[in-house]
Image (cartoon, helix red, strand yellow):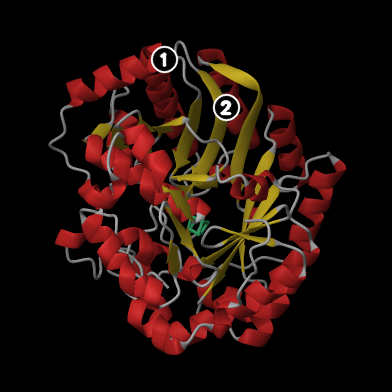
Amino acid sequence: MAGRKDLNPMDIPHSLLAKHNRSGPRYTSYPTAPQFTDNIDLEAVRSIWTDANRSNAGLSLYTHFPFCRSRCLYCGCFTEVHHRLDTGRVYLSALKKEASKLLRDFASNRRVHQLALGGGTPTYLGHEQLADYINFLRSAVKFASDAELSVEVDPRSVDEHYLDSLVETGFNRFSFGVQDLDPKVQDIIQRPLEEQHLHKLLTHLRSRKREAFNLDLIYGLPGQNITSFSETVRKIAALRPSRIALFGYAHVPWVSPHQKALEKYSIPNPNERMSLFGTAFEVLIGAGYKHIGMDHFALPEDELFRALQSRTLTRNFMGYTTKKGLDLMGIGASSISSVGRTYVQNGKDILAYNKRKDGFHWEKGIILDEEDLLRREIILDLFCNFYLDQSAIENKWGVSFSRQFAQELHDLGPMADDGLISMGQHSLEVTPLGRFFIRNICMVFDKYIKSEYTEGRYSKTI
Ligand code: SF4
């Protein structure tokens, strides 16, 4: 794994891109969200969550803040634009109600190893409000002394004073959405951000001995070209964040109608997208970053890279993580939990969320059967670590891999012929070329995708 040679995506033949560019999931869960149903047995879910609490296993907490001060036109997140002063206060009170209930009923024996605030914009709230919420959680559940506390920060919404408060509250990982530093692109996507301001914030965090920050970029936005985007990536790499996410813009106006406003500009086509990604890839690898998973880059000393080397990287609704084996409890409108063999999702109606007195918001989900659990393990291993040890799967699950997955092994044949995967006698290994087609490779093991029409349901795989 350590000796794996990186391949520049620009060297991928166009014919191969065209052949595999279909719609498919990003596998932040398996089964994926379209399989969640409102016809779920909530009593059975409660019983599984109660058992999980008895097991004392570690826990990850996520809270969703669905508010922003303005709408960025590329946005695909669940969020609303609000300017009312009491919006945050009312929502915080509902969050506390839900957190109290979940943590009292299902986390009394558990310890939190990871806490993440996402959105929307968590920093839409005042820093006192965020501190109050974290202190509330700390009083409701035990935290591990080395717990990771991360927060998504809209750099436009904070100053050094705000960051000081986050540091004092205990946050030790900061994720900044940058997307592109080119003012022309920022103008098109309606997300103005001054480079100097970002620089000042990161310098300040460093002065407070906080080095763990991620910067997010997006390629494939209208107005981007190779020259200007490579300049953005060069500037971002020079800031030496420990991690950089390089997401592809997903144009899905049937889900996010505000994206239609971008159609009056020219949106990069698949070949142009691959050139933008390839250019950014070359800059980042040249600057000493390691390629992680599908779209992440990390400094070699970062734990994401160490987890990739030891094949222990995993993935949840928040993206790649080194915290394998943690259940995830989601709090807030639309948030998703993954506890034991369940996924459950809260309703998305914020008014209803605020009004509900009992703090109970589960609306849909799925209880995984044995086959789902087995396929989830296979898909996550391939997706995150690009490797599958078939013997380990056989020993753990008591199955004959070649018999149970005969069809899948057959379906992987053409991908092996295209050089995307190498099929050993007891293992599957995704090649450097195959990493760019990892969604397609994993889809072979997705039993639901075979029977459903995926166009329009998911973003494009490449
Ligand atoms: S700040 Fe983030 S969540 Fe809010 S509209 Fe912009 S991209 Fe979407």
**Regarding mark 2 in the picture, which secondary structure is present there?**
strand
Tell me the residue that label 1 is attached to.
55
Task: Give the image quarter of residue 139.
Answer: top right
Quadrant assignment for the C terminus:
bottom left
Quadrant assignment for the N terminus:
bottom right
Does residue 51 appear in this view? yes
Farthest residue, direction front? 425
Q: Is residue 183 left or right of residue 449?
A: right
Identify the residue at image location x=56%, y=40%.
125
Q: Position of residue 340 (x, y in %)?
A: 34, 28
Q: Dot 2, crowdedness within 10 Å: few (<14), some or many (≥20)?
A: some
Identify the residue at image location x=37%, y=35%.
395
Instruction: Decide: is 307 above or below 199.
Output: above
Does residue 81 appear in this view? no
Tell which tag, 2 or 1, sits nearer the viewer: 1
Between residues 41 and 208, which one lies in front from this camera angle? 41
Q: Is residue 358 left or right of residue 137?
A: left
Mark 1 residue type: Ser
Distance between mark 2 and mark 1 Cα atoms: 15 Å
Q: Dot 1, crowdedness within 10 Å: few (<14), some or many (≥20)?
A: few
Tell me the residue that label 2 is attached to.
113
Mark 2 residue type: His
Q: Position of residue 331 (x, y in %)?
A: 41, 32
